[in-house]
Image (cartoon, coloured by chain):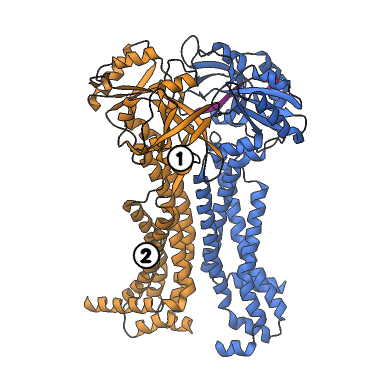
Amino acid sequence: MKDFYLIYKNLTRKKMRLFLTTFAIFIAFLIFGAIMSLRSALNAGVEMSADNRLVVVHKTSFTNPLPYAYVNKVKAIEGVKDVTHANWFGGYYKEPRNQVVSFAVDPQSYMTVYPELVVEPEQLSRWYKNQTGILVGERIAIANNWKVGDRIPLSSNIFSQKTGGQTWEFEIDGIFKGNEEKIDTSYVLIHYKYFNETQSWGGDSIGWLILTTLDASLNEQVAKVIDSEFANSNNETDTSTEQAFNKAFIDQIGNIGLIIFGVVFMAFFTILIVVGNTMVLAIRERTNEIAVLKTLGFASSRIFKMVLVESCLLAFLGGLLGIGGAFIIIKGASEQMARFLPNLVLGSDVLLQALAYMLVLGLITGIAPAISALRLNIVTAFSRG
Amino acid sequence: MSTLMSQSAAVIKMNIQSLPRRLWMSLAMVFASAVVVAILLAFLAMAKGFDATMKSAGSEDIAFFMRTGSAAELNSSASREQVNLIENAPGIARDEQGPMVSPELYVIVDGVKKSTQNEANIPLRGLDQRGVAMRKGFTLVAGRMFNPGTDELIVGAGILREFDGFELGQEIRFGKYKWKVVGVFSTGGNVFESELWADAKVIQNLYNRGSSYQSIRARMTSPDSLPLIAEYLKNEPRLTHEVQAESSYFAEQGKSLGYMAMFGWVISSIMALGALAGALNTMYTSVSDRAMEIATLRAIGFSHFSAFIGTMAEAMTLAAIGSIVGSLAAFIFFDGLSASTLGGSFTQVVFSFQLSPDLFIKGISMALIIGFISGFFPAWRAARVPVIVAFQTAR
């Protein structure tokens, strides 16, 4: 207890320095928390993908359509459990800049392949029956202030209606959630059949296929069979696991992502180095007092511990405040940015990493002065001072 | 006045000369302000490079037609009939071959990125000689032009730089079809260099596009013809297109990385607060380190002002050194750095980071602000502490 009092007194002897040091650590961890959450939000699609889900796209590019007949051909392949398909609708709400990620899908099979999407049963059965119905994700519903029962216009920046115009009207039949917080619910689903019948391009084509295999170990084999089935046809396919597909998509953002995270991470470490330097010097200044403590009979190991505890306390004081600040910022931003960046949460993995860095900061800045305190010879210390 | 000057000069000299005594603390401050500057410059250079790549692509006297609401070339469409209607629009320049109109196709193909070995989208543009002639600064860097009606294509210099397998003479497979690279072109670093170009008719054929196109470019007799053309589009019910100057289309696209500059300002401002805390620590340490010195000078008649200015000068010097180090680091690591990201049409845009004098000035001013604030308060303390107290605390 007495030790803690001493540590407390040491920490607070120069209020200004304590404040400045804590503030710098606070800033470092604020940036760390915010950036790491941003990064894990970007990668959430990769993390959350099911391990037995495969995506089949056109070999030339996933923006090229595939013939509808492929659905049944793929269904017949051994090892395939369920198959569904989707079309990119290119939707926007009222204004082109207000983009709404929207897929035209076959409702029943889509919900079978994506069991992580949770909808109230009565809402779901209403949507199944209602061709002009739309199922909206929770996040995008909140962002646009949509409620079940609303009628909303959705325009497409790709397709036109047969009757002219590019705007379709839909009724919101239900809102889907994810069974985990990180699952993306920032998109909407419409009926493929209705879309295909009303759009002017015609052509019974689908954007891509999603299927589940009976077991993840069959993935590779099934993918090979599918691609060889359509080899040398007009529409060759490229089948990959959902995880690989999502990863490739994120990588399209390109090395600027890498550069940004590299730069910011460097910033984080720089602040830690600068702060660490200050902390080391702050303890070095006290050589004389440590000599006094030793003269009074404090054991070397006790002083060693006190110095370490002091630096760790300081690291955690600033660090926890910083992570707390990041948490509040992320909380606020996730509502603002739901449309561009779903899954923005400060997860426990980020928190654990931050705690580890705080501990490392505390130990590294404490260890050098602690060791020199341990070894300090009283006579030389006094003669130096 | 002159004593004030000479006093200040003497104190500044003493402060600077005593810096090695506080080497680590001083280095920490230099380091912190250097990193703030480098980070700010990295983000600004990224946004600037992307913006320049887009903006320099557009011409003022080229009218650019897309289907209403399509937002990007990829989503637009135009039938042969609509192209003919646009050819008859007023204000469009003509030469001996008729109206200078270039209907173009825009399809996406996959390429393998050198940096990650992953597949990424690249645009394959279908056009003809007329379209090629409409691009500012177009030059063939190597090889020759594609022959109309053949499966030959030419690649942009940016694609060659960032993607594998597009070297001159290579055969490339997209799905079922093979293409031959017969030329490499440059358009002076702008976004068109991130594209592959081939004959429009061949692409129509291979990609089942019939006789339809996507976007249309037309050379105007002058930039003032734009309202005339817009009026014509409005009154022609068979046309579902919007027109804008090509330059304004690309200016809009260039803004899409504008958030990077904003993000850079936010991050580096927050960083600057952290650095400021570090710098204040440094300067307070400096003042207490020199407490004896300051007290002595004051006792022998040096003014408050000279004590103040001495500390200020020290802080500004450290910050300025930091800003130079940071700018140099940013210049070495980021200037001209080739990067690529997703652009408006869902395809890769290859661009280079670009640092310019105005960006350096922004970076250096930021560091000097840090220096000023971190110097001011400790300098105030140095100047205000009564001589007696200074001697006591200095021990």
Please tell me how crowded label 1 is: few (under 14), some (14-19), or many (20+) other residues with Cα within 10 Å: some
Where does the image place residue B250, in percent across and percent down from the top left?
Answer: 37, 33
| Residue of label 2 | B320
Tag 1 near tag 2, CB within 8 Å: no
Colour-to-chain, orange: B
The quadrant in which the N terminus of chain B is found is bottom left
- Can the viewer see residue A147? no
Is residue A276 among what the camera can see? yes
- Amino acid at the residue labelled 2: Ala
Image quadrant assignment for residue B70: top left
Q: Residue at 66% x, 58% y: name it.
A: A356
Considering the numbered disc 2 on the image, is that residue within a helix, a strand or a loop? helix
Q: Quadrant of residue B380?
A: bottom left
How dense is the environment of label 2, judged by Cα within 10 Å: few (below 14), some, or many (20 and up)?
Answer: many
Q: Which residue is drawn at the image coordinates 32% and 12% (left, top)?
A: B235
In the rendered image, residues at marks 1 and 2 fall on the same chain? yes
- Location of mark 1 (residue): B167
Q: Position of residue A223 (x, y in %)?
A: 69, 31
> Horizontal and vertical percent for residue B184?
39, 38
Helix, strand, or loop for circle 1?
Answer: loop
Residues in magenta?
A97-109
**Protein chain holding label 2:** B
Q: CA distance from mark 1 to mark 2?
A: 46 Å
Identify the image quadrant of residue B176: top right
Specify the chain shown as blue.
A
Residue B39 located left or right of residue A380: left
In the displayed structure, does residue B98 sit left or right of residue B211? left
Does label 1 or label 2 sit earlier along the sequence? 1
Q: Is residue B17 magenta?
A: no
Label 1 resides on the chain identified as B
